Image: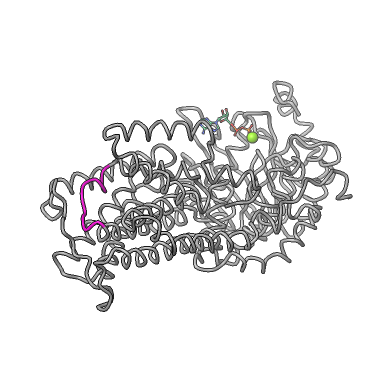
Amino acid sequence: MSAHDVAVPAAVEGDGARPSGRTYGVLLAVLVGVILVAPYFLYPVFLMKVLCFALFASALNLLLGYGGLLSFGHAAFFGFASYISAHAAKVWGLPPELAILSGTAAATVLGAVFGALAIRRQGIYFAMITLALAQLIYFVSLQSEFTGGEDGIQSVPRGVLFGVLPLTDDRTLYYVVATIFLAGFLLIFRIIHSPFGQVLRAIRDNEPRAISLGYRTVQYKLATFVISAGIAGLAGATKALVFQLASLTDVHWSMSGEVVLMTLVGGMGTIFGPAVGAIVVVSMQNYLATLGAWVPIVQGIVFVVCVLLFREGIIGVLSRWTKRPL
Amino acid sequence: MRAEAILATRDLTIEFKGFKAVDGVNLNIEQGTIHALIGPNGAGKTTCFNLLTKFLTPTKGTILYKGRDITALKPAEIARLGIVRSFQISAVFAQFTALENVRVALQRRRGDSFDFWRSERVLTRYDREARELLEAVGLADYASVRAGELPYGRKRALEVATTLALDPSMLLLDEPLAGMGHEDVDRMAALIRHVSTNRTILMVEHNLSVVASLSDRITVLARGKVLAEGSYATVSSDERVVEAYMGGMHA
Ligand SMILES: Nc1ncnc2c1ncn2[C@@H]1O[C@H](COP(=O)(O)OP(=O)(O)O)[C@@H](O)[C@H]1O
Ligand SMILES: [Mg+2]
């Protein structure tokens, strides 16, 4: 038989569907460069907020963009971790690194529980169960004493990192937060471009086929859910120390919606999209703050415009124009 | 039950809201044969496949593989036993290149698929074997083409290559020739014959001339029940089979 009897469609650029490592290398270098110089131009606290949400959105994107699962309850992990982190630093007097670690661990465990309950559901049912479970956490946070109810946990001490580096200075804390962000971001990058990530993509692409090849797909999805919850927790735990506050805002369902929004605006299923989405949304909230009650409305309009104009999100569109995965 | 049956069913039945799509089916697939499952549309052939691979759970009946009761297993476990199916609608990973499609199967067999801390570059170690498999199904030139962009016949060939990567002892092929042009049909029929060496194949197919030339044994299904069974000569001369085909089969 001749292999040439049908025209061979154009091969995908480079070695298969994977991008050249060089594109990513350059973009990562640019990212690190921007992160290093940013505090000389913008307020460190604003930047730290952006970084926390960028990490949060990247964690959600791992699940949504690469696992194909829409969680509408990720605020539970973000907010729960921030309560634990704040409590650990303030009440237990733990140093910041252990406070953040406690929050992250708590979110990971919570993720395992929620994941085990939700992971077999598909599509909208999965979103609804995650939302319902997150609402449970919200009501517990509202009622229980440990969270401080409506007041939240205030005046959380930032402490001294590893017993040597006081974090009271915003600029110092900024570089710590930037390091945490980069660590989380690179972890996600590695997961996506690992043998595990390859299977995850196969499952998202065609789950029955993956099963018929012998993959226990539920295990892969559950692992992704737990990792995603853990990293969302890392972001929340860090944010509690930055703002020295853990509050109901962070466990509220609207927070879950906001992080989905960031991911969609930036481009789900792209590496850099969620971070870009976080920059857009957080900037909007900050610079439009004078509009008061109008902020959510403006935000809603931006969202609708985004969805209508570029459904793949900002980075998704760029990725299509430049013909390379970003 | 013949001693050499590799896959057998006893009274296999599934009911959808009172409607028996598969009704008391007893199958005996002999080791090393090509066994065809034919019948009019809606006879329950695909449902049978779904039951055998546990994508559906039978209401009643048992499935035996090499004498072992596998009725309670999950679909992924069935695949791990060496029973691998194809789908009526071709099933490839559309976003992956042809090479990656085969690789993802090789990767499963080797079992390093949970490594999330390593670079996917380690997967290049499967490239050589994956290329050999692509070559075996005539896809050598398509290795770096995205599977979604392959012509239909090539997609089916890729599906076979991916399946073969698992080196299954048994293949279940659901209408492997459907929607193919002449040339593709001949190529695929030759391929099926080629891969049947040392393997058992259960195949649903409407192309009766291919069924006649390929299969050792044929089971005819109609309205969920086994209508006839035997060689092509036996089955094709059976009155009830002829009747069932007149009454609605487009083959
Ligand atoms: N999940 C299901 N729910 C209800 N009815 C089904 C389901 N799957 C198949 N059927 C019915 O079972 C019958 C057999 O279908 P199928 O096995 O696809 O036939 P074949 O593959 O032989 O053409 C059809 O009448 C179909 O409508
Ligand atoms: Mg069918």
Q: Position of residue B201 (x, y in %)?
A: 70, 50
State whether residue A315 is above or below residue A309.
below
State whether residue A187 is above or below residue A7.
below
| Quadrant hosting residue B21 | top right
Ligand 1: quadrant of the figure: top right
Outermost residue, left side: A145
Nearest the eye: B49 or B144: B144
Q: Position of residue A88 (x, y in %)?
A: 19, 65
Q: For the point 62% across and 29% down, which residue is it?
A: B42
Q: Position of residue A194 (x, y in %)?
A: 55, 63
Outermost residue, bottom side: A164
Is B161 magenta? The answer is no
Q: For the point 88% across and 44% down, which residue is it?
A: A5
Is residue B230 shown left or right of residue A302? right
Is residue B234 shown left or right of residue B102? right
Nearest the eye: A255 or B140: A255
Is residue A27 shown left or right of residue B106? left
| Quadrant hosting residue A110 | bottom left
Magenta span of residues: A243-252
Nearest the eye: B70 or A69: A69
State whether residue A187 is above or below residue B11.
below
Colouring mode (rainbow / by chain / secondary structure / one colour): one colour
Nearest the eye: A188 or B110: A188
Outermost residue, top side: B247
Q: Position of residue B91 (x, y in %)?
A: 64, 44
Is A251 magenta? The answer is yes
